[in-house]
């Protein structure tokens, strides 16, 4: 059974940094796109950053220049380095990945989320 497990969230002051990690486990043939989403209280979930298996990236405008997404294909892990954090970055961050696995084949998976809180 495939699982995505996030780590690295926490409380940080504005201007600080955090690094999120998300590791996929299970019998995995291939991982295509991986990404990070976030959902703030009272708001819809939004895409923060995504990365293809080849390393191409895209970011939502509000995090460009501050966040960096990367992945280690050998470890089935995606990272999100977050610098210059702002209070408006406060949200639950979710990992997402499109995975080919033995069972049930190809589908999108979500982690359970990790809370990032940025204080003023």
Image (cartoon, rainbow, N blue to C red):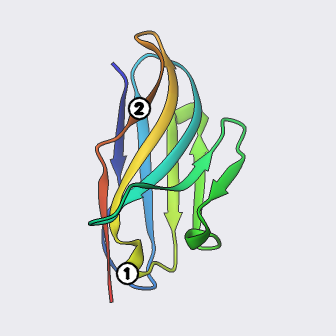
Q: Position of residue 95 (x, y in %)?
A: 42, 45
Relative placement, left or right, of 91 versus 102 is left
In percent of the image, x 39 and y 21: which residue is there? 26
**Residue 109 image label:** 2
Check disc 1 and report its element: helix, strand or loop: helix
Q: Position of residue 105 (x, y in %)?
A: 47, 12
109 vs 11, nearest the viewer:
109
> Is residue 80 positioned above or below 95 on the image?
below
In percent of the image, x 45 and y 53: which residue is there? 37
Quadrant of the image containing the C terminus: bottom left
Give the image quarter of residue 93.
bottom left
> Is residue 76 positioned above or below 29 on the image?
below
- Identify residue for label 1: 87
Q: Residues within 10 Å of mark 2 (few under 14, many from 20)?
A: some
In percent of the image, x 33 and y 65: which residue is there? 40
In percent of the image, x 52 and y 30: which residue is there? 98
Relative placement, left or right, of 116 versus 50 is left
> Is residue 26 positioned above or below 94 on the image?
above
> In the rendered structure, which disc, 2 or 1, sits on the residue that comes first in sequence?
1
Q: Position of residue 13 (x, y in %)?
A: 35, 84
> Is residue 2 positioned above or below 103 on the image?
below
**Residue 59 image label:** none
Check disc 2 and report its element: helix, strand or loop: strand
Q: What is the distance, in whole Å, between disc 2 and disc 1 at their CAs?
A: 28 Å
Give the image quarter of residue 24.
top left
117 vs 59, nearest the viewer:
59
Quadrant of the image containing the N terminus: top left
């Amino acid at each position: 059974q495939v699982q995505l497990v996030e780590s690295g969230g926490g409380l940080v002051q504005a201007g600080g940094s955090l690094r999120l990690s998300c590791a996929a486990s299970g019998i995995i043939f291939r991982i295509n796109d991986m990404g990070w989403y976030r959902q703030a209280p009272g708001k819809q979930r939004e895409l923060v950053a995504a990365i293809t298996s080849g390393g191409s990236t895209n970011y939502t405008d509000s995090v460009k220049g501050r966040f960096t997404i990367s992945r280690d294909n050998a470890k089935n892990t995606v990272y999100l380095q977050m610098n210059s954090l702002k209070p408006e970055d406060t949200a639950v961050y979710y990992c997402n990945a499109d995975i080919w696995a033995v069972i049930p084949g190809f589908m999108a998976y979500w982690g359970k989320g990790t809370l990032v809180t940025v204080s003023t």
